[in-house]
Image: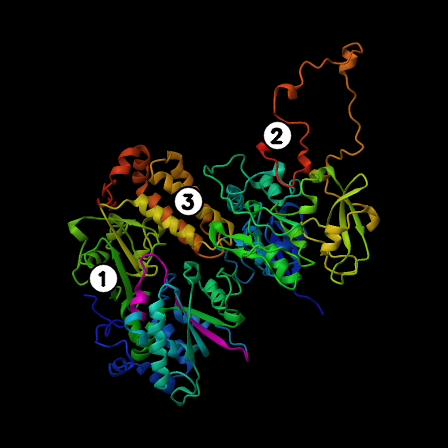
Amino acid sequence: MSETLFKVTIDNIVIEVPAGTTILNAARKIGGEVAPPTMCYYSKLEGSGGKCRTCLVEVSKGSEKDPRPMPKLVASCRTTVMDGMEVKNITSERVLTARAGVVEFLLINHPLDCPICDQAGECYLQDLSYEHGADKSRFEFQKRTFKKVDLGDKIQLHMTRCILCYRCVLVANQLTNQREHGILDRGDHAQIATYIQKNLQNDFIGNIIDVCPVGALTDKTFRFKNRVWFTKPVDAHRDCNNPKCCGEVRLWMRGDEVYRVTGRIDEWGEVKDASNGKPGWICNECRFDKKKVSDWVIEGPTNVNRHSVISQGHYVNSVLPQETLPEVLNGRQPKLLMDIHNVSEVNKPNIELSALDRPAHSTDF
Amino acid sequence: MGSIKLLLEKAHVEGIRYYDVYRREGGYRSVEKALKTMSPETIVEEVKKSGLRGRGGAGFPAGMKWSFIAKPEGVPRHLVCNADESEPGTFKDRYLMEFIPHLLIEGLIVSSFALGSNDTYIYIRGEYAWIVDILEQAIIEAKNNGWLGKNILGSGFDCNIHVQRGAGAYICGEETALIESLEGKRGNPRIKPPFPAVQGLWMRPTVVNNVETLAAVVPIINMGGEEYAKIGVGRSTGTKLISACGNINKPGVYEIDMTISVEEFIYSDEYCGGIANGKRLKACIPGGSSVPILPANLLLKTAKGETRFMNYESLSDGGFASGSMMGSGGFIVLDEDQCVVKNTYTLARFYRHESCGQCSPCREGTGWMEKILWNIESGKGKMSDIDLLWDVQSKIEGNTICPLGDAAAWPVAAAIRHFRDEFEWHITNKEEAQKRNFGLAHYANPIHVPA
C-alpha cells in the first residue's frame, strides 16, 4: 500500500511527508533550526500541543489547490500539512516577533530561580529564552505565587515555575489508572494541584517529571543533591517486572553513585521508544528506588549533544591547576589575615546547605 | 423609521411568556410549516437565502454554518443553543428568553429538524438561574402540546430540548469551550480543527448558534428567506436586537432593522432617547465589550465623512483603524464624564479574570495589561507604559487558541489608538487625574475629510 505523500516547503527546504503529518513533525524531519521550539507538544502524548504557542509558524501558501496564505499564525504542532504548502518559520519576521512575545509571556511570572532549580541545565524554558528571549524584562510587577501543594515524598511541585503545558495531566490520563491531579482555577491563577492534598502514588506517575519542560515537577529523591552538569549520564537497563515499564533508563551518576534515574530523552526532549518497541516510560520503582549501580546493567555513556551544558563540565576526576602562590612567595604558605567566621555570622561553616530539604533561606546562614 | 419588528413584535402582549397566549398570537406556525411542507434541505436553503448572520458576535452566515455540518451515517447530530451571554454590555438574549421563551423553543424545533438533531441543548449562563425555570416551563408546555417529543406532528421527527446551566464562565460562550463544558469537562476551548461541524459534542457533528440567531429562524420560515433578506441593507439582513446601556436616557433592548443611523439610534426617542442628564456623547462601544471603542466623531461619521449606520458593514467601515464591529449588539454609550482609561482598565480586568489560562499569550498577557492599566489609572504610570501596553496587546492578538485573546486585546488597542491623549494626560497630570476626568476634549470634534 502506497502512502500519499505531500510536498511541503518549510523555510525554503522541500520535504515529502505522508498525509496527516503535522507541520511540526515535517519540520522535525528536516531538523535543526527549522523545527519550531515546543513547550507543550509531546508526540508520545495524545492530544498534547496547541497551548504554549511557541511553535507558531506562518503559512504563506495554504496548498497547491488553495494557495491563499493563512491569515493568522498557526500552531505547527496541531496543523496538518497540505500538498504544496509553504511554511515560514525562522524566515518569517512575524513568527520571530510572535515567538519572542510568547517567551516574554512565559517568563513574566516565572521566578527565574534557575540557580536553585534542579531543572537548570536541562530546562527547555532556559533553552527557549536563551534563543528567543530578550535580555531584560519589561515586567515591573510582583510575580504571582501559589500556595504550596505537597504531592508526596517522591515528586516535588513548584507551581511558580509551571507554564501549564498540560503534559503531566495527559501523562496521568494516559499512563495511569486514575488521574489524581489536575488544573484548578482558571486564567493566570490556573494551577496544577490535587484539590484535597493527596500524594501522587500511581506506579507510573513519576513520568510526569520527565515530561515537565520546566522545573515545576522534579524528583524529590534527587532534590538539591547535585547539579545535572556535574553528573554523568549513563544508559542502563534492568529486568523490570512491571509489564508496562520498559526498563531502559538513563542513570545520572557521579563517581559510583547513582544520583537520579530518568527515562531516555531524545533530541526533541521526549522519551525514546525502548529497543523492544515499548514506549520509553519507566515505573516509579526503577526511577526512585533503584539507586545502586548493582541494580543496573550499564550500557555505556549517553551521547549528549555537545551544545548542552551537561556535556560541558565534568568535575569528577578533573585536575586542578597547580597552586602558584607558594612558588611566587618563595615556598612560604600564604598567611591567613582574617577568618571571616570570627567576625561575621555569614556562611556558617557548620551549616551543610546540601542537607536542607528545601531551598536555602537567609535565615539558614 | 426602523420600525419593523420580527422578534419583539409580540413581546409586550400580556402573558406571551406562556404557551396559550403565544400560540394564540400565531406561535408555532413555523414548526407546522417546516415539518409539514418543507424538507431539512429546503429549510437550510431558506436560511441561506435569508442572509441571516450569526448574532453572537462573529457575524458568520448561519445558513453557511449549517451546510458545513457533517452527516456521517449512523452518527447523531446535535444543535446547541449558545445562551451563555456573558459579554459585558450584552443582554439581548436574556430579554428574549425571559419574555418570549417560546420563540426560542420554536426556532430550536425548526432548526433541529433542519439539522437532524434529536437532542438539542440550550447551554445557559449560570447567572441566568431564573430563566432556566422559564425555559424548562416553556419546554414542558411545548411538549404537552405535541411540539416536542416523539414523532412531532406526525412527521416522524423526534426532538427533545435539554437546558444545561453553565457555572458562570465567560469563556464557555466560546463554542468549543461550551461543548467541553456541556460534556462535563473543564471549559477550555478546543484547538481547531476539527471544527464542531465535524466533531463537536461527544465528537459528533454539532452546530452551535446564538439564541437570537435561532429565534430569527422563526420569521425566516414564516415569511420566506427572500422576504427576510429584503429587510435591512446589503449583507446585513433582517433585524438585530441591540441592548443599549450606559449614559443614555432609555437603556434597554431594541430591535432595529439595520437601516437607521447610529446618530438616530442614540438620539431618537424611539430608541436610546439621547444622552442622559443633558451631557454630551464622548465615546461608544457599539457591539459588546470586546469590540473597539470609538470616539464620538468616528462613531457618528466614518473616516470618509459618511453617516455611520447600525449594521455590520457600516460599523466596521474603516477597519480597526477608524471603525469597530457590530459584535453581539451590546451598545455601551459613554458620556463626557466617563474616563476611557478607567473603562479600559475595567475591561482588562474582566478579560484577565475570564481567561481560561490554557494558552500563554492570553493567560499571561491579560494580567499584564490589567496591571499596567491599573498603574496608569491610579497615577503610577510612565509614558513608556503606553507603548508597552500597545506592544503587549499586539502580541496577544491573533496568537491565541480562541478569540478571547483578540477580545482582550482589541479594546486596549482601540483605546490607545483613539484616546492616546487621555492616557498621556493621566501620566503627565497624575494628581489631577485622580480628582477629575479628562472630559470630552476634542473627541467629538468633526474630523476633516479631504474632498
Q: Secondary structure at mark 3?
A: helix
Q: Quadrant of the N terminus of chain B?
A: bottom left
Residue B95 at x, y percent in the picture: 29, 67
Mark drawn on residue A36:
none
Residue B88 painted magenta = yes
* Residue under label 1: B260
Amino acid beneath label 2 = Phe
Give the crowd class for mark 1: few <14, some 14-19, many >=20 residues within 10 Å: some
* Residue under label 2: A365
Residue A153 at x, y percent in the picture: 66, 50
Q: Are marks 2 and 3 in contact (CB under 8 Å)?
A: no
Q: Disc 1: which chain?
A: B
* Residue under label 3: B369
Q: Quadrant of residue B46?
A: bottom left
Range of the magenta residues?
B73-97
Amino acid beneath label 3 = Met
Of B192 and B298, which appears nearest the observer? B192
Residue A355 painted magenta = no
Give the mark toward the camera: 2 or 1.
2
- Residue A161 lies left or right of residue B258; in this view the side is right
Q: Disc 2: which chain?
A: A
Q: Quadrant of residue A352?
A: top right
